[in-house]
Amino acid sequence: MTTTEYAVTGMTCAHCERSVTDEVSQIAGVDGIEVSAAAGTLVVTSEAPLDDALVIAAVDEAGYAAVRA
């Protein structure tokens, strides 16, 4: 099991969290997602390491910016 944390900017509410969760959950191999607008974090759990570019692109698609923490 691999856990990767990202810093996400621009999120302010539960709707933001849902948007990021919806986009990231579409990536193959994702087993779990924890998003916190208050902390500005995204934690992704997967069986194998994911390509950071895929996760960052998914967050971008949701309308926010992310970098690996």
Image (cartoon, rainbow, N blue to C red):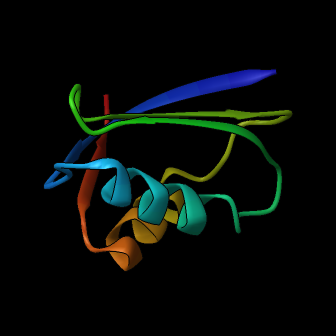
Which residue is depicted at the point 48% across and 68% down?
58
x, y (%) of residue 61? 39, 78
The quadrant in which residue 6 appears is top left
- Determine whether, in the image, residue 30 is placed left or right of residue 58: right
Identified at 27% across, 74% down, the residue is 63
x and y percent of residue 40 in the render?
23, 35
At which x and y percent is residue 56? 40, 59
Which residue is farthest bottom? 61
Q: How many marks?
A: 0
Question: In the picture, which quadrant includes the N terminus?
Answer: top right
Q: Residue at x 23, y 25 (%)?
A: 39
Position above or below: 34 against 67: above
Q: Is residue 4 above or below residue 64?
A: above
Q: Quadrant of the C terminus?
A: top left
Rendering quarter of residue 54 = bottom right
Which residue reaches farthest front? 14
Residue at horizontal 20%, vertical 52%?
11
